[in-house]
Image (cartoon, rainbow, N blue to C red):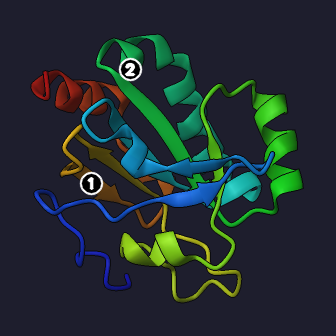
Amino acid sequence: MDNVNRIRVGHIAPRILLDDPDGKRIDSYSFKGKKNLIIVFHKGEKSRGCLDWLQELRKSSKKIELFNCIILAIAVDQPRLMKKLKQKMDWDFPLLYDKRSETISAYGVLDSSSEKGEPHPATFVVDRLGIIRYRKVYSDYKEKSTVREILLVLEGLT
């Protein structure tokens, strides 16, 4: 797999400054001191495994919110596809469009074999101070994190 170990637990999380499908700019720095973040890099609408993982997180969103946490999902899908996907899946968290794969690269999860600049599927938990407290990068979503793992990490942040 590519150089996915560049960003590790204990590192300061790179800034995320991306638009959602409606053009609303989301800045991860606006959550500093306020919210923990679950950041999910996914292959988008073509990956059933990625969509299933995001759906699992959505089903646990009430538990996640108890830990003062929000989910940010990042892909290279076109905004119109993201908008349809968000409506179809009934997701209440931001889907962010990384057109030039800049955030994907900053987090060290760029899949060099992808012509579109897609990420390796990955999950990060970032605390309110902006420090990465959990990261898992997958070769595929058969190895994905579990909601239980994520909740245990979030529990440790309180």
Please give left or right for residue 22 compared with residue 51 in the image. right
Look at the picture and state if 123 lies above or below 61: below
**Compared with residue 119, is residue 140 higher up or lower down, i.e. above or below?**
above
Looking at the image, residue 113 sits to the left or right of residue 135; the answer is right
16 up-or-down from 66: above or below: below
> On the image, which quarter does residue 42 sit in?
bottom right
Q: Residues within 10 Å of mark 1 (few under 14, many from 20)?
A: many
Reading the image, the residue beneath label 1 is 135
> Which residue is more in the foreground, 22 or 111?
22
Q: Mark 2 to mark 1: distance in Å?
A: 17 Å
Residue 124 image position (x, y, % from top left)? 33, 50
Is 49 placed above or below 120 here? above
Does dot 2 land on a helix, a strand or a loop? helix
Q: Secondary structure at mark 1?
A: strand
The residue at which mark 2 appears reads as: 64
Going by the numbered disc 1, the residue's amino acid type is Arg
Q: Residue at x 64, y 79 (%)?
A: 100
